[in-house]
């Protein structure tokens, strides 16, 4: 119980080290999401808009 109390005290007191860790974690996570979106969205559009051999294997639902 005292560990939880200590954690809340760090948050409520605005511990600089804690906020630096949280900020770094958010920067890394959001950067990873942006890089994945930059790679994945054009690839998804390419797969959706072009015809190629084996395309039907990649589609889960046929739109005819």
Image (cartoon, rainbow, N blue to C red):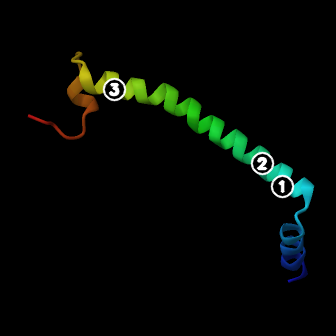
Q: Residue furthest bottom?
A: 1
Q: Residue at x 41, y 24 (%)?
A: 42
Q: Is residue 4 above or below residue 10?
A: below
Q: Secondary structure at mark 3?
A: helix
Q: Residue furthest left?
A: 64
Mark 2 vs 1: CB contact within 8 A: yes
Residue 62 vs 14, above or below: the answer is above
Tell me how far mark 2 sits from mark 3, CA to CA.
Answer: 33 Å
Q: Is residue 42 left or right of residue 38?
A: left
Foreground residue among 10 and 59: 10
Q: Residue at x 71, y 41 (%)?
A: 27
The alpha-carbon separation of the residues under discs 1 and 3 comes to 38 Å
> x and y percent of residue 31 in the render?
65, 35
Residue placed at 25% from the left, 34% from the top?
Answer: 59
**Mark closest to the chain's N terminus, 2 or 3:** 2
- Residue 52's disc is none
**Residues packed near mark 1 inside 10 Å, few (<14), some (14 to 19) or many (20 plus):** few
Measure the C-alpha gap from mark 2 to mark 1: 6 Å
Q: Earlier in the sequence, mark 1 or mark 3?
A: 1
In front of the other: 41 or 3: 41
In x, y percent, where is residue 63?
Answer: 13, 36
Residue highlighted by disc 2: 23
Residue 12, percent from left and from top: 85, 71
Q: Secondary structure at mark 1?
A: helix
Which residue is the site of mark 1?
19
Return the residue nearer the eye: 30 or 58: 30
Mark number for residue 45? Answer: 3
Judged by depth in the image, the label closer to the viewer, 2 or 3, is 2
């Amino acid at each position: 119980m005292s560990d939880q109390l200590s954690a809340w005290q760090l948050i409520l007191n605005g511990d600089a080290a804690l906020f630096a860790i949280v900020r770094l974690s958010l920067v890394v996570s959001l950067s990873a999401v942006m890089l994945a979106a930059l790679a994945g969205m054009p690839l998804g559009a390419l797969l959706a808009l072009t015809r190629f051999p084996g395309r039907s294997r990649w589609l889960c639902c046929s739109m005819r």
